[in-house]
Amino acid sequence: MDYAFVAGALDRFGELREDAGWLRTRFDDDLARVIVLRGSREVLLAQPEPRLLSIPLPLLRERFEFERFVYLGEQDAHTLFALMLRDEEHAEFLAIHSAVTAELRAAAMNLPPHEAGLAAFASSLAYWQSRSRHCGVCGAHTLFSAGGHRALCSNAACGAAFFPRTDPCVIMLVHDGERALLGRQPSWPEGRYSTLAGFVEPGETLEDAVRRETFEESGVRVGDCRYVGSQPWPFPASLMLGFMAQATSQDIRIGREMADVRWFTRAELAGGAVKLSPRFSISRHLIDTWIGG
Ligand SMILES: [Zn+2]
């Protein structure tokens, strides 16, 4: 799969990063590098080519304490950390490193897929951290450990631990063999259509979610569903689970959250008149796969 936000060959060392001593050895590695975000939604890019800004860790170690860095993992024999800048630190970084700031979604269009994957990983963690500063059980403030992947309640009598969450979301190309069912949301530009999608609810299988969401958004019934692949979708913390789904009815009743839902033939979709999702998305991958037969 060549869609974005798939971190590829990154080895996260999920067990070892629990070991603070081991994590310190990664932090002391002079070859380690750091990608840089502003808050959780923007990423710093090197110029002129659109690549993630990647700063040698020794340049930052003196200034920023260990706890500010999030451990991402090991890739191509390099240790990778992420640093989330505060607003007052941001302008200085742009000047020193001749960098520019880009919103994550826009950056994903131009970055190599594995770099968009790293940015997505870091941004989802940053988003989670920004909303995990207090314990959900007793309200005391939390401390981040395990390289930023765990929030631990600072109240020893409580000791609750919290981990980054991912929200599963089904996304489906519903078809009747000859036509594909696509919809558009009210906020989208005129003429843009995409696959239907929606969040999985507690107690629901993925296949049930495909059938429920399709029916809610279009009134169309679905039978067989076939899992195709997944894509992390860091807006802010979803995991898109892609399906090909066979329709068992044709009549459309447009759901409340949709501006339009229509059937399209392969010729209509391949002809360019319909504005489809960007190439880096699993939605586009599903549509292109279906057009290709
Ligand atoms: Zn607590």
Image (cartoon, rainbow, N blue to C red):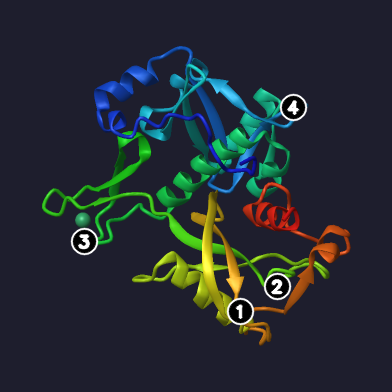
Residue type for callout 4:
Gln
Q: Which residue is mark 2?
A: 183
Mark 2: which secondary structure? strand
Q: Which residue is mark 1?
A: 217
Quarter the C terminus occupies: bottom right
Asked if the residue under mark 3 is in contact with the one under mark 1, i.e. CB atoms within 8 Å, the reply is no
Residue at the left extreme of this rendering: 157
Q: Nearer the viewer, mark 1 or mark 4?
A: 1
Asked if the residue under mark 1 is in contact with the one under mark 2, i.e. CB atoms within 8 Å, the reply is yes
Q: Nearer the viewer, mark 2 or mark 3?
A: 2
Q: Check residue 138 in the rendering and tell me which mark sits there, or answer none.
A: 3
The quarter of the displayed image where residue 1 is located: top right
Of pointers 4 and 2, the one earlier in the residue sequence:
4
* Mark 3 closeness class: few <14, some 14–19, many ≥20 residues within 10 Å: some
Residue type for callout 2:
Gly
Q: Check residue 47 in the rendering and tell me which mark sits there, or answer none.
A: 4
Residue 25 visible here: yes
Asked if the residue under mark 4 is in contact with the one under mark 1, i.e. CB atoms within 8 Å, the reply is no
